[in-house]
Image (spheres, rainbow, N blue to C red):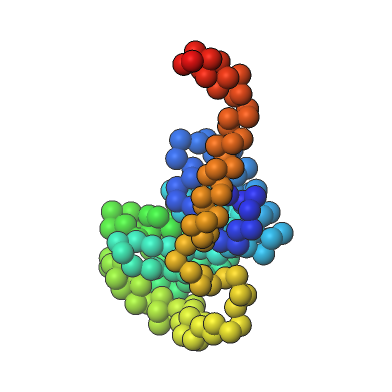
Amino acid sequence: MIVGPRKTLFMDEISTGLDSSTTFQIVKCMRNFVHLMEATVLMGLLQPAPETYELFDDVLLLSEGYMVYQGPRGKVLEFFESLGFKLPPRKGVADFLQEVTSKKDQAQYWADPSKPYVFIPVSEMAIAFKNSRFGKSLESTLSAPYVKSQSHPSALSRTKYAASRWELLNSCFAREKLLMTRQSFLYIFRTFQVC
């Protein structure tokens, strides 16, 4: 898929069944592709290793149907510290992000000694994100209307199908001709057999 003129890739849990070093190599390759080709990759990973997590530019944290955080990877801890949670030493950021939204695991990350710990549901975290400077900057970016005239002419589809029926028919005949010439011995033998 990357070989063609793709500028956007959507990948869901590509690490399923892979070990962490293979996942790291794939994500590193994707990162190089993104930076060299000026492309966008939206990748969903479940519990990535810390070194794999460090390869990402931005993080989108979803939980229980809410967007808890979206923004630069380096600022995600700052956002959760503003809510009163802190990453303990020797803990991976990806594991922290997964557990801080869980009712069962959230209490261990509470770091605000001035207030007693009270469970913060995901819905309240999402509201806090929208009201934070991270959410407001995202909202101002997304609120700008899309201007079709500024996009590349090839970016928007003008027809229902990519190729016309005549082009599809031509392609099918060319493919069958190629298959027949590759296996000409079989067709000649079958013709003699039928005769």
Q: Quadrant of residue 155?
A: bottom right
Judge whether residue 112 can be spotted in this image: no
Closer-to-camera residue (86/3): 3
- Residue at 59% from the left image edge and 42% from the top image edge: 174
Closer-to-camera residue (6/63): 6
Closer-to-camera residue (67/33): 33
Closer-to-camera residue (153/14): 153
How many marks the image carries: the answer is 0
- Residue at 69% from the left image edge and 60% from the top image edge: 37
Q: Quadrant of residue 65?
A: bottom left
Q: Is residue 80 above or below residue 148?
A: above
Farthest top residue in view: 193
Farthest front residue in view: 195
Q: Position of residue 152 (x, y in %)?
A: 62, 75
Q: Position of residue 148 (x, y in %)?
A: 54, 82
- Residue at 61% from the left image edge and 51% from the top image edge: 2
- Residue at 67% from the left image edge and 64% from the top image edge: 38
Q: Is residue 91 above or below residue 127?
A: above
Q: Is residue 85 above or below residue 51?
A: below
Judge whether residue 83 can be spotted in this image: yes
Q: Is residue 166 above or below residue 141?
A: above
Q: Position of residue 101 (x, y in %)?
A: 35, 60
Q: Position of residue 161 (x, y in %)?
A: 47, 62
